[in-house]
């Protein structure tokens, strides 16, 4: 299973590097093996790699193929986000017996919302989502303008209310996206969620697993449409 996980990561990295093969061997193999042992779902790892490449392109023309080691912080960040979304408190330990903290820089609220609006607008322009999502984009843009208008940042009760609205908007977006999928695709996503949660299921009650499963399906719906997370912590 670990070897297969590493092969999938290597193949995905090759595609992201425009066909340039960067082998996952030696220390890189040990790194990716730890991801598999921690129970990081393969699509969560892919999303972390995507996040690194998105930032890499944003900083200017690419200079060299990306090694998987460079993506570690983003993969762990996305895994942390996935665990929070599904309600899984702690990741599985690495070989050293400790959980590795995410290390990528944290965005401010305006930066987060700018990224959300950009990704939603790009998805709309590319046809990944349609006009039904325009109200979601508009509401996100309103929140972005409001956050930029505060010179010292949104704080206190106003921040609490903003975060609550963003959470509601995120749930509305996922519900809309899910409504566009047929039952066969939903069934496939539920099966994937079962597989993603399998390493953690033994430590969950039936009720906790049901909540985690629903959240895991929601995250898979998000990735199916390449949607950003609007909620912010």
Image (spheres, rainbow, N blue to C red):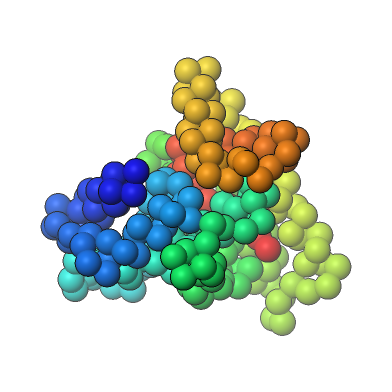
Q: Position of residue 41 (x, y in %)?
A: 45, 47
- Closest to the observer: 67 or 223? 67
**Residue 195, above or below 53:** above
Q: Is residue 174 visible?
A: no
Extreme top residue here?
A: 183
Residue at figure coordinates x 40%, y 60% from the top left: 34
Residue drawn at (61%, 40%) of the image: 201
Q: Is residue 188 above or below residue 107?
A: above
From the viewer's side, name the closer residue of 93 and 5.
Answer: 93
Counting from the top left corner in percent of width and height, residue 188 is at 47, 25
Q: Residue at x 49, y 74 (%)?
A: 103
The quarter of the picture where the N terminus appears is top left
Q: How many marks?
A: 0
- Which residue is at the far left? 20
Image location of residue 83, percent across then percent down: 60, 53
Give the residue drawn at x 34%, y 59%: 32
The C terminus sits in image quarter: bottom right
Q: Is residue 216 above or below residue 149?
A: above
| Residue 27 appears in the figure | yes
Q: Going by the picture, which residue comes out furthest to the right? A: 157
Q: Residue 104 vs residue 217: left or right?
A: left
Q: Is residue 75 left or right of residue 135?
A: left
Q: Position of residue 142 (x, y in %)?
A: 66, 57
């Amino acid at each position: 299973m670990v070897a297969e996980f590493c092969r999938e990561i290597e193949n995905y990295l090759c595609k992201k590097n425009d066909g340039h093969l960067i082998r996952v061997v030696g220390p890189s193999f040990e790194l990716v093996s730890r991801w598999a042992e921690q129970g990081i779902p393969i699509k969560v790892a892919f999303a972390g790699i995507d996040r690194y490449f998105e930032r890499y392109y944003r900083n200017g023309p690419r200079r060299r193929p990306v090694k998987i080691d460079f993506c570690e912080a983003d993969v762990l960040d996305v895994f942390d986000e996935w665990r929070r979304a599904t309600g899984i408190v702690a990741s599985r330990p690495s070989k050293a017996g400790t959980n590795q903290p995410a290390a990528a820089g944290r965005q401010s609220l305006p930066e987060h919302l700018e990224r959300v609006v950009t990704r939603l607008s790009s998805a709309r322009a590319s046809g990944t989502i349609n006009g039904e999502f325009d109200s979601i984009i508009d509401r996100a843009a309103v929140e972005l303008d409001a956050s930029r208008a505060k010179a010292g940042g949104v704080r206190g009760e106003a921040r609490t209310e903003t975060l609550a609205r963003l959470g509601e908007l995120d749930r509305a977006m996922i519900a809309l996206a899910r409504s566009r999928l047929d039952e066969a695709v939903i069934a496939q996503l539920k099966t994937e969620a079962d597989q993603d949660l399998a390493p953690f299921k033994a430590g969950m009650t039936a009720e906790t697993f049901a909540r985690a499963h629903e959240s895991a399906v929601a995250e898979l719906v998000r990735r199916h449409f390449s949607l950003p997370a609007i909620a912010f912590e």
